[in-house]
Every structure is written in C-alpha cells, then in structure tokens.
Image (cartoon, helix red, strand yellow):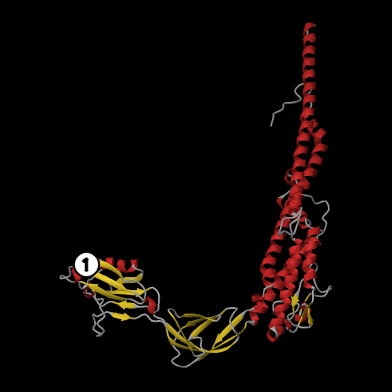
Amino acid sequence: MAIRITGMASGMDTEAMVQDLVKAYKTKGASYTKTQKRGELKQEAWKSLNKKIKSFNSKYVSNMKMSSYYSQKTTKVSDSTKASVVTSDGAVNGSQTLEVEELATAGYLTGGKLAKGTTADTTLKDLNPEFTGGKITINRGEGKEPLSFDVTEDTKISDVVKHFTDAGYNASFDETSGRLFISAKESGADNDFTLTDEGGALETLRLVDHKDGAEDGAVKLDGQNAKIKLNGAVFESTSNTFSINGLTITAKEKTNGTAISINTDTDYDAVYDKVKAFIKDYSELINEMDKLYNAPANKGYDPLTDDEKEAMSDSEITKWEDKVNESLLRRDGSLSSVSNVLKNAMLQSFDIGGTSYSLSSFGIGTLSYFTAPDNERNAYHIDGDPDDSDTAGNPDKLKAAIAADPETVSLFFQKLATNMSDQLGKLSETSSTRSHGNFYDDKQMKLDLQKYEAQVTKWDDYVKSIEDKYYKQFAKMESAMTKLNSQQNYIAGMFGG
C-alpha cells in the first residue's frame, strides 16, 4: 500500500476528505460482499443437509427395499453350556436336535523333565555327552510334506525352540519345570504331527512318548476333529465351529449321547428395532428440514463485514451470526421439493394380498396438529414405543403385526422404501444446475458464487480507481498551493518581509 502524506501545504485532512467522498461507493461494495458471504453460507448449509439426506437414503431407503433386510433370525439352544449358535438370514425356521460327540483338539507334546539346572542355553551335548549330532523330522498331516532340521552337539535348547517356531508350530521351554512344550497352531486331525529323528536327538531332549507314565517321559495329545450330529447326520470339522445351512454352531462340551435342541425363528425384536430406527431418523431429518424451511425471515440480519465485527463484542457477533444462519434456507425451493417427496412417500398405501396397508395399519402416525410442537408435525411416532412419551401407553400394533405376519410387514416397508427411493432418485438426477446424487442446485450455486466474487473484485478495483483520482486531484491542489506560498514568500522578501 502506498504511503500518502497529504495536507502539508493546505493544512486540510485530505485523507479524511477522500474517504468521505468514496464512502457511498464502499457502502455499495459492502452490500456485494454481504451477498457473496450469504451465498457461501447457504452453500455450506446445503452441503451439510445434503450429506444428511444422502446418508439417510443409503442407510435406510436403499437397504429397506431388499427382503433380506428383514430376514433377521435368532436361534435358542436348550443347553448353552454344550453349544452356541449364530444364525444367518438363510437359516430355516424350526427345531433341530444336536449332539456333540467329540471336541476338536490340537496336537500337543509335553516333553519329559530335563536335568536340573537346564536352561535355554544348555546344549544337546550338555544334556547327553554321547550325543554327536542328528536330525529331527516333523511328520505333518495327510498330504503335507515332512519338515526336517539338523541338530549338532552345540545346538542349544533355544535353537531347537526356534526351529519348531520357524516351521509354524508353537514351541517354548519352561525352565521352572524343565520341559519343552510343542503344539500345532490349529486343531484337528489334519493339523496333527508326530516326531521322528536320527542320532537320538528326541531321546536327548526327552521328546519321546514312551506311553509308560514314567516321570521323565513325554506325553503326546493327538489332534482330533470335532464331531457333531445334527438331526442324526454326522458332521466333522478341524475346529469346534461348523457352518451348516445358515447356522454357525460352536461345540463347547460333549453331550454324552443326550441330544439338545436348537430352535430357529424370526427375530421379531430385530425387525422391530430396524423399523423403529428408520422412523426415528426420518423424524429427526424431517423436523430439521421443517425448521430450516419455516425459519423466521430475520430481516436486517446480513453477514457482517470485518469493519462491522470490529465494532461489536464476541457475544454480539455470535448472536448476530446465529440469526443469519437460522434463515439461510428459509422458503428454499430445493428444500421444499425434497421435503415433499419424503412426506408424500410416508403417506402412501400399498395393496398386499388384497388388503390395503399404510403406516397407520401398524400403529405408526403423526401427532395431532394441536399436540405436536412447532416444526414437529410431520414426525412419526410408534404406538407402544416405550421410549416415546407421547405414544408409549398405546397398544403396540407394530410388534403384534411382526409376530403375527412378518412377511406382510416386510413387504409393506419394501414397497414404501422402493417408492421413496424412486422419487428421491428422480429428484437427484443430473441436470444443468445439479450434479448427480445431490438434492440442491450445487452447479448453479457454484456459478453464482463465482459471479458474486467477480462482482466484489470489480467493484473494489473501481473504488480504488476513484480513491486514486481524488488523491491525484488533492495532490495537484497541494502542489499549486506550495508554488503559491513560495511566490508569496519571495514577494514578501523583496519588500523587506
């Protein structure tokens, strides 16, 4: 910024005079800036609301069109200490019998007790002075190649442990008990193992199972498969988990020949909770949209300029900006369109099996005009919902309908969601003013903001040109007065002052 020194000859405050002369122009420029700022704020308000509408659409509307959304199943086990069951949507309703004959185990080798004082750094020669070297082979399950590693008299117990872990097994040495422990990482007969050797390495490490119960002998627990009977049919698994016809069964304990029952049925509570969540989030969204659309005009509250903010306290600024933001989407056309689509979709009736159903058929409706608070008259409530103080005392028609005829409830909400999805899809199609998937004219809004920005820049340049013109005029005046003062001083000097 150029530094101007004015009024030296005239004694006038030309800076203040210039600013007074351009004040009207700056005031008009501020109105352009406010228009630009309001446009930016409106764009941000729509971005936020648009995100919420899209989230509601993807979370509920898109999913609720699918029958699988309502195919919630649950299974109860007569003795949960013997088995647990997780139910998928494809499970068949009904009662079944289950027996747990065997539990899956992993191959586990507990080594015999080594000499007192043995540590991880003890070598095989320390354990057996006659040992000169050899090889240990891990014989794995069917179809798997054996794994071998060499050991020498200088091989430490810690080296042996590492060989087993590198081969994919759990291995450790417990100095307190003086024993090696080796096990398969996974259960089942196919993951079991046996050990063979050359040179007496296994005897030296006390890893040979003599099966004689001697205190220094190793003990091997063979890996085995789990085995269950479901409705009399035998199933085997390398783990204790079985996936059978939509059920994930986890065996916990043998039933010793006594069958337990597992009963699969529609999870009525899960279906109810999904409908309830949809109604709740719809109501919150529509309440917000009504509040934005019906907001007070707040005339006289325009976005503040920097100069205006300097003259206000922080609390005053906050209150002012709240008023501005409150009315940004008042009577907005795009807001009205999407709001009407949502409201009309909720009012539709659908024929199912020759009977017409609406939300009211399931005890779902709005409160009366005089009962509902302002901007909450389009919110829906579920009769008998214990979390809704307005309708908690009414008979619960929704739960009764789900229990009596879950298919009809599912079909109704599928139709409602499909209709709502179609209408929202049409509203958010690509156009000259709107990008695909958006519910407001984002393209047009962007163009308008560019126009506002150009207008502000153009006007700022115009005001500066006017300022420069006035400064030049006053500079000429100052120059002329300087010359005049000089001439007057010269003449006065000629006549003796």
Which quadrant does the C terminus fall into? top right
In this view of the protein, can residue 439 be seen by the observer? yes
In the rendered view, does 90 fall on the left or right side of 46?
Answer: left
In the rendered view, does 333 fall on the left or right side of 58?
Answer: right
SS class, disc 1: loop
Q: Amino acid at mark 1?
A: Thr
Which x, y percent locates residue 170? 35, 71
* Location of residue 24 with respect to 486 vertically, above or below: below
Which x, y percent locates residue 475? 77, 23
Q: Residues within 10 Å of mark 1 (few under 14, many from 20)?
A: many
- Disc count in the image? 1
Which quadrant does the N terminus fall into? top right
In this view of the protein, can residue 376 be seen by the observer? no
* Location of residue 485 with respect to 239 vertically, above or below: above
Which x, y percent locates residue 191? 38, 76
Q: Depth check: 128 or 102 in front?
A: 102
Q: Depth check: 337 or 20 in front?
A: 337
Q: What residue is drawn where x is 82% and y is 74%?
A: 371
Q: What residue is drawn where x is 77% and y is 54%?
A: 324
Residue at the outermost front position: 143
Residue at the outermost left position: 130
- Disc 1 target residue: 123
In the rendered view, does 289 fall on the left or right side of 128?
Answer: right
Task: Tell me where residue 430 sits by quadrant.
Answer: bottom right
In the rendered view, does 100 fall on the left or right side of 68?
Answer: left
